[in-house]
Amino acid sequence: MEYIELKNSDLKVSRICMGGCPMGGYGWGNAQEQELLDAINAAVDNGINFFDTADTYGLGQSEKTLAKGLGSKRKDVVIESKFGVRFSGGKTVYDNSSAYIREALEGTLQRLNTNYLDIYTIHYRDNTPIEEVIDTLVKLREEGKVRYFGLSNIHEEGLLELLPYKGMFVNCQDEYSLACRKFEGDLTEIASLMQLNPLTWGSLGQGILTGKYDRNAMFGNDDRRSRDIYVNFHGEKLTKNLDIVDAMRPIAVSHGVSIAAVAIRFILDYLKDSVVLVGAKRPAQILGNCEAIGWELTPEEIIILNEISK
C-alpha cells in the first residue's frame, strides 16, 4: 500500500480509502452484509487504513456496518464521517447548525461504536455562517470527540468564506474520475489555496470505469444507476465512458492489472497528493482496486487518458 500524511495533521493514511456509501445497503443493488463485512476485512488486510462514511448513507446503516466490520481494529484505522445532510418531511435538507452538528455527531459516534472521530467533514454547506460552523467544530475538538476537520463538495463560489480558515482542514472531497472531470479546477484550486489533500469520490464513475459494463447495461429499481440523473450509464455519456474504458484496456493488460486499477492510478498520478475514495460491496472489488498500488502510468499513458477523458 502507498501512504500519505494528510496536511495539517499527523494522520498517515492509505492513498486508497474505502468508501462507505455501498455499506448503507441502499441504492446500489444487491448488497449482502457478510460480503460487506468481508470487504472491510479485505481492505484492512491489504493495507487500507482509511475509511469514509456519512450519517446519510443508508440513514446510518453504513456507520453501523463499518463498526461491525472493523471491531477491535477501529483503533488501527482512520475514520472520516460527514454531517450536514438530514431528511425532513420526505425531503433532503442541508443543515450546518450547531445544534444539528452536535446531534449528528452523537448519533455517528454511537453507530460507529467509538468515542471519537478522526475526521469530521462538512458534507454540504447551507446558509449557516461559516464562523458558527467552525466554532462548533473547534469546541467538539476541545471536548475530544473530533480530531480533525474535512470539507466536501465545495466549489469556487464557496471558497471565499473558507480562506480565513486555511490550515484548519485536512482534506476536501469532490466527485472526480476519468468519467467526471468537471470539478477538477475547483478541487485543485481549493487544495492549493487551503493547503490540504484532495480526495476523490465517484472515482470509478459509479462502476462504469471497471470495464464490467457495456452499452446494454441494465439496473434494477433498487439501484440508483437506473435513473437518468446517474448520467454515466445513459445516452451519449455512456458512449463516451465506454470509449474511455476501451482506451484503458490495453494499458491494464500491459501492467497486468484490472481496468479499475488503471482508473484509480490515473487519479493518484495526475492529482498531486490525492487520496482515491472507492466504494466496494465485496472482497474481490477491494483486491481489484488495490492493484492500483505499486506502479505508475507512463507519461504517454497519462496523455492518452487525459486527452480521451477531457
Image (cartoon, rainbow, N blue to C red):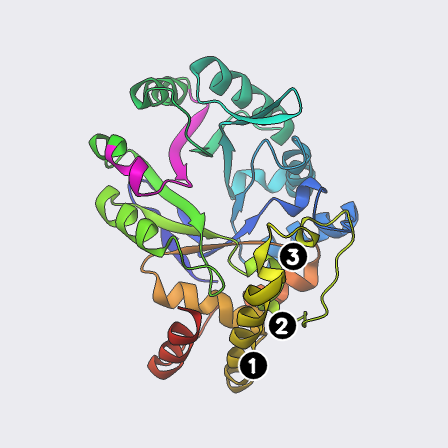
Q: Which residue is mark 1?
A: 249
Q: Which residue is mark 3?
A: 42
User: Helix, strand, or loop for circle 3?
Assistant: helix
The answer to whether residue 86 is left or right of residue 267 is right
Q: Which residue is mark 2?
A: 211
Graded by Cα atoms within 10 Å as few (under 14), some (14 to 19) or many (20 or more), the crowding at tag 1 reads some
Question: Quarter holding the C terminus?
Answer: bottom left
Mark 2 near mark 1, Cβ–Cβ under 8 Å? yes
The relative height of residue 33 versus residue 2 in the rendered view (above or below) is above
The reply, left or right, for residue 167 in relation to residue 149 is left
Return the disc, 3 or 2, that comes first in the chain's sequence.
3
Q: Nearer the viewer, mark 3 or mark 2?
A: 2
Mark 1 or 3: the one toward you: 1
What segment carries the magenta color?
Answer: 144-160
The residue under label 1 is which amino acid type?
Arg
Residue nearer the viewer, 78 or 233? 233
Q: Quadrant of residue 196?
A: top left
User: Residue placed farthest to the top in the image?
Assistant: 99
Image location (x, y in percent) of residue 235: 61, 64
How many angstroms separate mark 1 from mark 3 (CA)? 25 Å
Of the two numbered discs 2 and 1 on the same chain, state the one appearing first in sequence. 2
Kind of residue sitting beneath label 2 = Gly
Callout 1: SS? helix
Q: CA distance from mark 3 to mark 2?
A: 22 Å
Tell me what residue is drawn at x 34 percent, y 61 percent: 271
Q: Can residue 292 be seen from the camera position used here?
A: no
Which residue type carries mark 3? Ala
Residue 189 screen position, x and y as percent: 26, 50
Give residue 23's position: percent from left, percent from top.
Answer: 67, 44
